[in-house]
Amino acid sequence: MFHPFSPPAMAAQHSIMETLPYDILGLIFDMVKEMDFASLCALRFTSKVLNEAVESKTFISTTIGFSNRPWTSAQLETMASGTSTHSLWTRNLTILQNGLIPLEIIVSLKRMLAQSAESLESLTLVPNDWSTSNLNQPRSINLDELFEDPPGSLRVCSNLKELVINGNRIRLSALSAPILQSLTRLEVRNCANDNIDPTFWDALQDAKVHLRALTMSPITPRAVEYLASYTGLKELCMKAATYSHKTQSGAAGPLSVLESVLPKHRETLQVLSFAALGFKEFMCTEETVDAIMMCEQLKSLELVYHYPEQQSAVQDDQTLKLDRLLFRLTDRLSHLARLHIAPKRLMPRMRCGNGAMSYYRRMSDSFVKDICEVQFVARSPRFTVEAGRSCTLVFDHEARCFAAKED
């Protein structure tokens, strides 16, 4: 019988792991990861239950750096075992750009990739070289070779959505396509033309692999044909290589991109970049701007602008005046949030070192000044302008012109 002065029964105590649904806990751990990754790692040591809950989020991304450290091979062997936390949970794998990968370690690397093939969602392979023995004769490797384990048995990356490679160290061909059946984003840095075989694009097209984002320079004719074979591309970037190649035989001109690719993706394209091109390859003429204007969903646009030292001395230059270019972009691209525009010109000879830097600085400052002098009477651009030396300009509604962004 209940006694009026009896102490209340102690309520059963439950941990947060028992009271909150797992999907809510997942959201909380995601927030902790974004705000303080070190705290997320520390949770692993709180209890076995918490460790099981956060382990997958802690090891979702793995970065491998190679050096002369004696334990690198042992680390790879552990990761290649298939039982390490990295092997179990890694979804985003990066091999650092400064990696110099000894040939004898490639065996372990292949085993590790084979163990992670089914779970990988993002893979970045950007080594400087595959061998430290002879840097004067750099070696490239077929992508499919790295996913052969055992030899003759190709592992398929059924969940791989993003691939970033160093194009002069990794080769792509038709043999690579079976690995990339789910690929939606491809970035090829330092692209060597003969390392991207035309059969690669044929195989992607035959397998109906439709990229949503492609970053590559130069774009080859077969790549243009592939891009023109479907719809739905969202990002196309002709980025600059880390270092320039003296010859780019087989490169497609920007005209083919404007004529063949943009019309197919005009309804979906949101990011477009011609930043890797010179002013002789790409000019902001009425025709090129007309082609770009078709892509009315653009949010980010990167252009090259011919900016000669003496405007009056240039003949047959069809480049739009800055005011007309900015007006047209404002009128037609209502979703545009970012415009990157790089001034380029034929640089004077005998300028190097500090002299060249000083010359470029003056050109850049002059270009920014010209942009800021354009008056917008009846227009109000919504986009920011990146021009010159890392300078960001925003539209001043009172002054009706662009001005440097205040910190």
Image (spheres, helix red, strand yellow):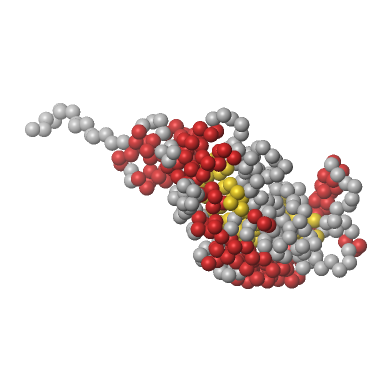
In this orientation, does residue 15 appear?
Answer: yes
The picture quadrant where one finds residue 102 is top right
Depicted 255 relative to depicted 79: above or below: below
Rendered residue at 41%/33% (across/down): 44
Q: Nearer the viewer, residue 275 or 397?
A: 275
Residue 80 locus on image (x, y percent):
47, 40
In this orientation, does residue 369 appear?
Answer: no
Rendered residue at 68%/71% (across/down): 259
Image side of residue 27 versus residue 133, left or right:
left
State the quadrant of the C terminus: top right
Rendered residue at 65%/43% (across/down): 128
State the quadrant of the N terminus: top left
Residue 70 locus on image (x, y percent):
57, 29
Q: Nearer the viewer, residue 317 or 91?
A: 91
Residue 6 locus on image (x, y percent):
15, 28
Depicted 217 relative to depicted 34: above or below: below
Residue 25 locus on image (x, y percent):
38, 43
Depicted 195 relative to depicted 131: above or below: below
As drawn, which residue projects farthest toward the left? 1
Rendered residue at 45%/41% (across/down): 87
The picture quadrant where one finds residue 342 is bottom right
Depicted 352 relative to depicted 45: above or below: below
Image side of residue 25 versus residue 72, left or right:
left
Q: How many marks?
A: 0
